[in-house]
Image (spheres, rainbow, N blue to C red):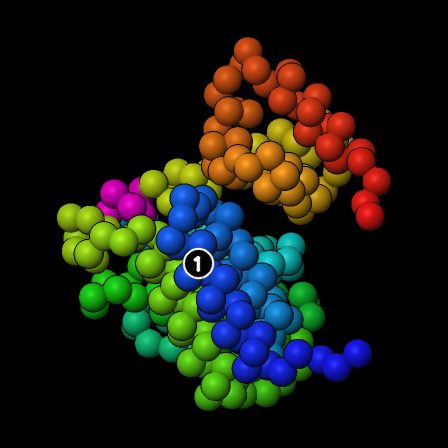
C-alpha cells in the first residue's frame, strides 16, 4: 500500500481542524486532537499544550502520552524547561540534544526528560495579537533539530489552538481572560471525570480518558459537557456510569 504523501496528510489535518472550528466543538477535545496531530505529522514522539491562566500561571491542557503529560507537569513544578522559557520569552525554543549544555540551562528538567526517554525538546508559543497564551511542547526520542517545515507546521497548529480557545473573538485582554478561564475550567472538570472513571472502571487515567472521549464521540456529546454531567449531576450519574461501563466493555472491531 502506498503511503499518503506528507504534504497531503498535513493539508488534510489542517482542513479537518479548521472544519471543526466552523461547527459546534469542544475546546478540550479539539486541543487533544491537535496534540495527536503533532505526534503524527511532526518528527516528534509526543506533544503537549500548556495554557496560562489570567495570573500568568501555566497549566496542562492536553498531552499525547502519559510521559509527555508527566514531563509537562514536571516543568510546571520545577519552573524550568522549554515550554516555560517559550512562554516567558514569547519565542520558539529548540534544543536538539539534551546534553550537558542543556542540563546547565535546565538542571532539574533535563535529567527528568532523559529518564523518560526523550533526547530533544522544542516549544512554540501560543500567541495572539502580541498576547502569549501558552506554549506547545514537542518531545523527540532521538537527538536532532526540528526541521524548518516542522517548525512552521507546529506554529500553525499553535495558531489553530489559539483560535480554538478564543473561539473567534478578537484577542484583547478583555476577551482573552474569560476564554482562558473557560478553557482551564473545562480541562479541570475533564480531569475530575477521568479520575472518577479510573476508579469505577479500574483502568489507568489514560484509558479512562480514551473511554470518556470515545463515548462522547459515539453519542454526539461535548466532552466537557459529558464530564460536567458526570461530576455535577448526582441523579443521572449512576445511569451514565453504567452506560459508559457497558460502552467500555464492548469488543473493539
| Image position, residue 40 (x, y; %) | 62, 70
- In which quadrant of the rendered image does the N terminus lie? bottom right
180 part of magenta stretch: yes
Q: Is residue 85 left or right of residue 233?
A: left
Q: Is residue 36 left or right of residue 148?
A: right
134 up-or-down from 201: above or below: below
| Magenta region, main secondary structure | helix
| Image position, residue 158 (x, y; %) | 40, 66
| Image position, residue 73 (x, y; %) | 52, 54
Count up the numbered dots: 1
40 part of magenta stretch: no
Kindly identify the residue that appears in the image at 55 percent across and 11 percent down.
235
Residue 146 visible in this rendered orientation of the protein: yes
Kindly identify the residue that appears in the image at 66 percent across and 31 percent down.
197
Quadrant location of residue 79?
bottom left
Kindly identify the residue that appears in the image at 59 percent across and 87 percent down.
144
186 up-or-down from 21: above or below: above
- The residue lying toward the viewer, choosing from 193 and 40, is 40
Residue 76 visible in this rendered orientation of the protein: no
User: SS class of the residue under badge 1?
Assistant: helix
| Image position, residue 130 (x, y; %) | 21, 68
What are the residue bounds of the magenta stretch?
Answer: 177-181
Residue assigned mark 1: 19
Dot 1: few (<14), some (14–19), or many (≥20) neighbours within 10 Å?
A: few
- The residue lying toward the viewer, choosing from 129 and 220, is 220
- The residue lying toward the viewer, choosing from 70 and 28, is 28
Kindly identify the residue that appears in the image at 46 percent across and 88 percent down.
148
Quadrant location of residue 184?
top left
Q: Is residue 23 left or right of residue 90?
A: right
Amino acid at each position: 500500500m502506498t503511503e499518503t504523501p506528507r504534504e497531503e496528510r498535513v493539508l488534510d489535518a489542517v482542513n479537518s481542524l479548521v472544519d471543526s472550528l466552523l461547527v459546534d466543538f469542544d475546546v478540550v477535545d479539539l486541543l487533544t486532537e491537535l496534540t495527536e496531530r503533532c505526534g503524527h505529522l511532526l518528527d516528534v514522539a509526543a506533544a503537549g499544550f500548556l495554557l496560562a491562566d489570567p495570573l500568568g500561571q501555566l497549566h496542562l491542557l492536553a498531552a499525547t502520552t502519559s510521559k509527555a503529560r508527566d514531563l509537562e507537569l514536571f516543568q510546571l513544578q520545577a519552573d524550568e524547561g522549554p515550554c516555560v522559557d517559550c512562554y516567558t520569552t514569547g519565542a520558539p525554543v529548540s534544543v536538539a540534544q539534551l546534553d550537558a549544555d542543556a542540563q546547565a540551562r535546565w538542571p532539574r528538567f533535563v535529567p527528568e526528560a532523559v529518564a523518560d526517554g526523550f533526547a530533544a525538546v522544542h516549544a512554540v508559543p501560543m500567541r495572539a495579537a502580541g498576547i502569549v497564551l501558552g506554549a506547545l511542547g514537542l518531545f523527540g526520542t532521538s537527538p536532532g533539530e526540528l526541521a524548518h517545515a516542522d517548525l512552521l507546521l507546529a506554529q500553525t497548529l499553535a495558531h489553530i489552538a489559539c483560535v480554538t480557545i478564543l473561539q473567534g473573538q478578537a484577542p484583547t485582554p478583555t476577551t482573552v481572560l474569560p476564554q482562558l478561564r473557560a478553557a482551564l475550567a473545562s480541562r479541570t472538570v475533564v480531569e475530575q471525570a477521568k479520575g472518577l472513571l479510573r476508579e469505577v472502571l479500574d483502568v489507568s487515567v489514560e484509558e479512562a480518558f480514551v473511554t470518556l472521549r470515545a463515548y462522547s464521540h459515539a453519542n454526539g456529546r461535548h466532552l466537557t459537557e459529558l464530564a460536567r454531567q458526570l461530576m455535577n449531576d448526582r441523579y443521572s450519574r449512576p445511569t451514565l456510569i453504567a452506560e459508559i461501563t457497558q460502552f467500555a466493555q464492548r469488543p473493539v472491531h
